[in-house]
Amino acid sequence: MSINAVMATAGHALLLTAILVRLTSGLRLDGIGRYTAVAITLILAAIPLGQLSAAQYSLGLFGEISITSTILLGRYLLLPQASQLESRQLFILMLLTGALFYPFALGISMTDPYQWGYLNSYRGIEPPLLFLACLIAPMILAIRLDNLLIILCINLALGGFMLKVLESNNIWDYLIDPLLFLYCLASLGIYLIKELFGYNRANRHFPT
C-alpha cells in the first residue's frame, strides 16, 4: 500500500473514530478507557469488511481529507483537554478561508485561487510562491495569538505537500477540505443559535 493510500485511509479511520467517540460521549470515558476505546475503534475501522474497510468506504464516499483535518481529529481523540481557544481560532481561519475560496473555485469569478496551489505556472507567477505569500498573514496572526495549533497545521500541511503524502498536487487540499469547512460552518451556526436562545431567555428573565 502506498503512502498516499495509508494517509488517506488513516485520515478516514480517525474521522470515523471521532464520530463514534462523539456519539458515545455520554459514557464519559477518561484516561486509559478513552485511549483503549479509540485504539479499538481505529483498528476496527481499518479492518477490511469484505474487500474494503470502513475507512476505505468513507474515503470513497467523501474523498481525501486535508492534513489540517487529520491533525484536528488526532488532537480531539488523543488530547481532549487541549486548548479550545486554539481550536476556535483555527475554525474561524478555516471558515474565512473556505468562504473566500470555495465560491471562486466553483466559477463565480474569472479568478480561481484553487489554481494557485498547482505546480504549473499560472499567469506568469509560480503558484506555490503566490500561495505561500497568501499564508504570510495567517502565520503572522498565529504567532501574535501564540496559537501553536495553527502554526503546526500550516507547517505540516506544507511539509506533506512537499513529500506528496496525499494524491493531490494542490496545496489547498493539504490545508483545507470541504468536510472541514462544512464542520466549521455548522459549528458557527450552532454557536449563533445557542447565543440567540440564550439572549432571548435572558431578556425574558430580565426585561428592559
Image: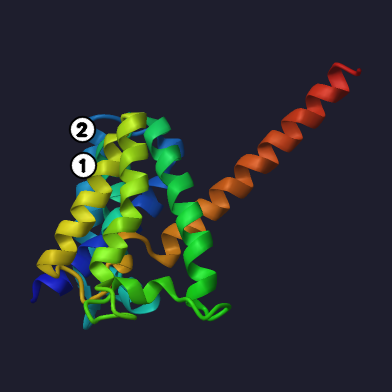
Give residue 147's mark: none
**Quarter where residue 44 is shown:** bottom left
Horizontally, residue 182 falls left or right of residue 162, namely right
**Which residue is disc 1 drawn over?**
36
- Which residue is most to the front? 124
Here the colouring is: rainbow
- Relative to 130, say whether 87 is above or below: above
User: In the rendering, at what x and y percent does residue 152 appear?
Assistant: 23, 44
User: In the rendering, at what x and y percent does residue 24 appear?
Assistant: 42, 44
The kind of secondary structure element at disc 2 is: helix
Q: Amino acid at mark 2?
A: Ile
Horizontally, residue 154 falls left or right of residue 165, namely right
Do tag 2 and tag 1 residues touch (Cβ < 8 Å)?
A: yes
User: In the rendering, at what x and y percent does residue 36 appear?
Assistant: 21, 42
User: In the rendering, at what x and y percent does residue 60 appear?
Assistant: 33, 79
The kind of secondary structure element at disc 1 is: helix
Horizontally, residue 94 falls left or right of residue 63, namely right
Q: Amino acid at mark 1?
A: Thr
**Which residue is disc 2 drawn over?**
32
- Which residue is most to the right? 208
